[in-house]
Amino acid sequence: MSVALSRYSARRSVLSSAKSSPGEILEAAGDFLRRSSRVGMEGVEDALRGLGRPQVEAWLKAQKPQSLQPVLLRAAEEAVEVALDGGEEAEMWRASALEGLAARDRAASAARALAAWEGLHGALQGDAAQLRDSFLSALGTLDSSLRPRARWFIPLNPQRRQELELLEPAEQDTAWWFSARAGCDDLVATWTGRPQSLTPHLQGCVDCRADMADAAPVDAPPRRHLTADDLWRFDMGLMTEDERARVDAHTARCGECAQAVLALGEGEEAVEEALDMDMEEGAVGRAARSSRAPVSGRPSAARHPEQREVLDERRDFRVVLVRERQRVRLLVQPLSGRAVTAAVFLSPGRPSLKPTNGPEGLSFDLTTASSTGARSAHLSVQAGSETLERDFAF
Amino acid sequence: MYEQLTDDELFAEVVRRRAAGEPVGAHLGSLVDRWGRPARYVISKIQASYGRGSPADADELFQDAVGKFIDRGLDQFRGVSEQMPGRSASPKTFFLRIVKHVAIDFYRRHREELAAPPSDPDDAMEEPPSEVARAVEAGKRTEQRAEAQELYWAAFARLQQEHPKEASAWELYHHEDVEDHEECARRLNITVVNSYKRVSRAQAYLKLYLLDLQRETQGEEA
């Protein structure tokens, strides 16, 4: 005899106990009615005949089926913990989650017993009939909203199947808390990873296949792109070291954000150029107009100090490290008109920095890398049959 | 009208008037007018960087930048100047940086919308039916992808609310590209085993939340 079967058999005493409340009698009677083939009907009719109309009406008035919703939602979380915890507490989660399902099942039993009681005593009338309809309708609403979440209870499947076997066939589908997804045990393994191979159940079960397909975005989660605020804080030097590391890691994989960071550098260069242009024009204008506006006194060379270091020079190209006030870049300058390709790798296995093609040749901006603590990189240059592979510090 | 004032003097007057609750429109207008040309130069460079853009965009972006400068820039300038002396040497430099950011933000947001517009509006009408069907299908896919993303982020928001520790680990590991449990553990000040555990738990809950949200959405649509 299964544990569940002996538990129901033991409830028979509730039917005849003088201490039992009307609700307890209805729940116990319904338990037997819904499992009559397995546990028998002994004592059920007598117990229901013994319940008077005022008792049943008072019981109906006190019912709040909507209070089962938080109970079932908590049971769902607890059921998932059975699968995720896996430790000593798993059994505690299982017992608590099963108690939540049992609460919903007792409500179904009470509803079934109420129908049987009406069969013996005659239908409820007036306000009592309305209370009965509200009670049944609230249970229906609860089921409609929670049945689609039955997958949460899959970790309880061994116990749910035991309960299911005891129910009359006509009751089984309605009792979704025991029956829905009761054979989908294999799905649990897909929650924490992608299985190497699909079991026959996962291949054949329409619900499991739909779940796996619909949950796929979690297996390849979207990355958080750099926001406008991120770019501003990065540009203004307001980021922490970890935040800058994140920018570096993200731009190594995300072309769109790498382009934005690149544009920041190019834009900064444009800001400097625009300031220079204005200053030169201002100087000319002042000489011509003798304007009263004071000169900002910002000689270009002082504001824009630039150090150039030739790292390597071959027949077809020259490699120059250019340090400016806030920037470091590597220039690969073609010398012979032959096409030159180059790549700069900050670490093995990561993609090359994206170069820009300017009048001086290929330019690799190392500013971001420098600000995140990188101090060296690997350079690869090819011009015709000539190649250069070397590390360099910046 | 304000020619005799330098940029810094005019800016100081704007800040003073703003603090006193006096109108700043004329002073500010005069100030940003001086910066129109360099601002357009910066915009043109960002346009070149993105390989897109038009003079009409430049006007719009300039106006947006002025708006941002008024809304937030005046206060931010003070903040940045105090926090990072030298980073924004003058209000003009600061304004040009706002211009730069406004332009980058614009072309990032409009990357797909601006891709290859038809040169002649009538061209769109002359597309063969197969091309139209393909375009409609592509549009649908884009919309579905956007909806899927939206649901994913809604599921993540629920994870943050109900399992904040797991959400932090997931955020760091996946959304922020760390993808290294040792580094996650260091940043979260937890053990490496805990990092594995939190990310794994986050994955399970995210899937369940996402599936719930999808079914709810389907239920609402039905």
Image: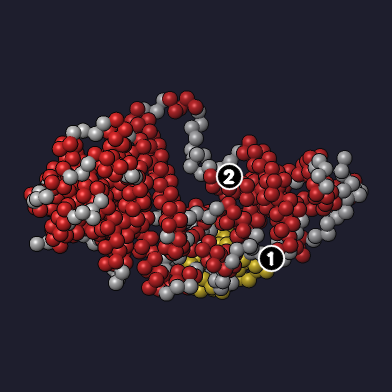
Residue A111 seen in this snapshot: yes
Disc 1 or disc 2, which is closer to the eye?
Answer: 2
**Where B91 sits versus A378, above or below?**
above
User: Residue A144 location, x and y as percent?
Assistant: 29, 41
**Where B206 sits versus B220, above or below?**
below
Q: Secondary structure at mark 2?
A: helix
In the rendered structure, the answer to whether residue B140 lies left or right of residue B73 reads: left
- Pick whichever, B26 or A362, lies toward us: B26
Question: Around disc 2, counting alpha carbons within 10 Å, would you say few (fewer than 14), some (14 to 19), or many (20 or more)?
Answer: some
Q: Residue at x 23, y 59 (%)?
A: A156
Give the quadrant of the N terminus of chain A: bottom left
Chain for disc number 1: A
Give the quadrant of the C terminus of chain A: bottom right
Could you give the CA–CA distance between mark 1 and mark 2, rounded to whole angstroms?
28 Å
User: Residue B215 location, x and y as percent?
Assistant: 33, 44
Residue position marked by numbered label 1 in the rendering: A325
- Pick whichever, A104 or B66, lies toward us: A104
Residue A312 seen in this snapshot: no
Q: Secondary structure at mark 1?
A: loop
Count every numbered label the image shows and give the total: 2
Question: Around disc 1, counting alpha carbons within 10 Å, would you say few (fewer than 14), some (14 to 19), or many (20 or more)?
Answer: few
Q: Specify the quadrant of the image occupied by residue A7.
A: bottom left
Which numbered disc covers residue B136? none
Q: Residue at x 24, y 39 (%)?
A: A53
Residue position marked by numbered label 2 in the rendering: B106
In the rendered structure, the answer to whether residue A320 lies left or right of residue A150 reads: right
Q: Amino acid at mark 1?
A: Arg
Q: Specify the quadrant of the image occupied by residue A57.
A: top left
Q: Residue at x 85, y 55 (%)?
A: A295
**Where A330 sits versus B126, above or below?**
below
User: Residue A370 location, x and y as percent?
Assistant: 58, 68
Q: Residue at x 91, y 49 (%)?
A: A292
